[in-house]
Every structure is written in structure tokens, then in C-alpha cells.
Amino acid sequence: MSSIKKDSMYLYNGFRPYVPKKKLADYDSDFFNRKRYTIKYMTSLIEKYVNIKYYHKKPKNDNDGVLFNFFLYDFSIRDSKINVAFNDFRDTPSML
């Protein structure tokens, strides 16, 4: 199983309790109707169904702080232009 798929399953299961009950069926169908998971898709899915700003400061479970930090500071920025440019710069061989 790829890293993105494992991370997507972790995020899906972790944020499921934060989805309002009336939107839970839509959340499940949006996730499972997808054949391929990307960072951009998972970020938009979670932002669509979960009130991140509210629950980030008041998680339902004390251990969910790790989930929110993973989503906000690690997973969501993997695909950002700055992060991609930095990785390209870091991987460029020096000409010394």
C-alpha cells in the first residue's frame, strides 16, 4: 500500500467522528467512490466536511491533536509550491 493511500485512510478514519451525522453518508461515499487518492483531493475532502478551525482548538479526544497537526503541518503542505520548489533545490547537485 502506498504512503498516500495509508495516510488517506488514517485521515479518513481519524476525521470521521468530526463529520456531522447528517453529512456522514456523503463523506463516506465521496471517499470510497474515489479510485485514486491525492493530497489535493484529501485536503479538499476534509476541509469540505470538517470544521478544522473549530475542532483544531477543541478536539473531541486528547489524542486527536496529533491527527490535526499531521493534517495541517505535514500532509497538507506536501504538495505546496514552496515545498516542491525547496525539495527540487535540495536535490539539485552542486557544481563544486
Image (cartoon, rainbow, N blue to C red):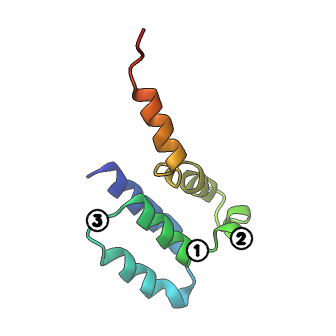
Q: Nearer the viewer, residue 10 or 72?
A: 72
Q: Secondary structure at mark 1?
A: loop
Mark 3 is on which residue type? Arg
What's the mark number on residue 54? 2
Residue at point 28%, 51% (across, down): 2
User: Which residue in the protein does label 3 denote?
Assistant: 36
Residue at point 41%, 55% (across, down): 7
Mark 2–mark 1 Cα distance, whole angstroms, equals 9 Å
Number of residues whose C-alpha sits closer than 10 Å to that of mark 3, classed few (under 14), some (14–19) or many (20 or more): few
What's the mark number on residue 12? none
Number of residues whose C-alpha sits closer than 10 Å to that of mark 2, classed few (under 14), some (14–19) or many (20 or more): few
Q: Secondary structure at mark 2?
A: helix
Mark 1 is on which residue type? Val
Number of residues whose C-alpha sits closer than 10 Å to that of mark 1, classed few (under 14), some (14–19) or many (20 or more): some
- How many marks on residues? 3
Residue at point 34%, 49% (across, down): 3
Mark 3–mark 1 Cα distance, whole angstroms, equals 21 Å
Residue at point 30%, 78% (across, down): 33
Quarter of the image for residue 31 reads bottom left
Q: Are marks 3 and 2 in contact (CB under 8 Å)?
A: no
Q: Is residue 35 left or right of residue 29?
A: left
Q: Nearer the viewer, residue 87 or 24?
A: 87
- Is 53 above or below relative to 88? below
Give coordinates of residue 15: x percent, y percent.
52, 68
Q: Nearer the viewer, residue 45 or 83?
A: 83
User: Which residue in the protein does label 1 denote?
Assistant: 50
Whichever of callouts 3 and 1 sits on the residue coming sooner in the sequence is 3
Q: Is residue 90 left or right of residue 38?
A: right
- Is 96 above or below relative to 79? above
- Is 38 above or below relative to 82? below
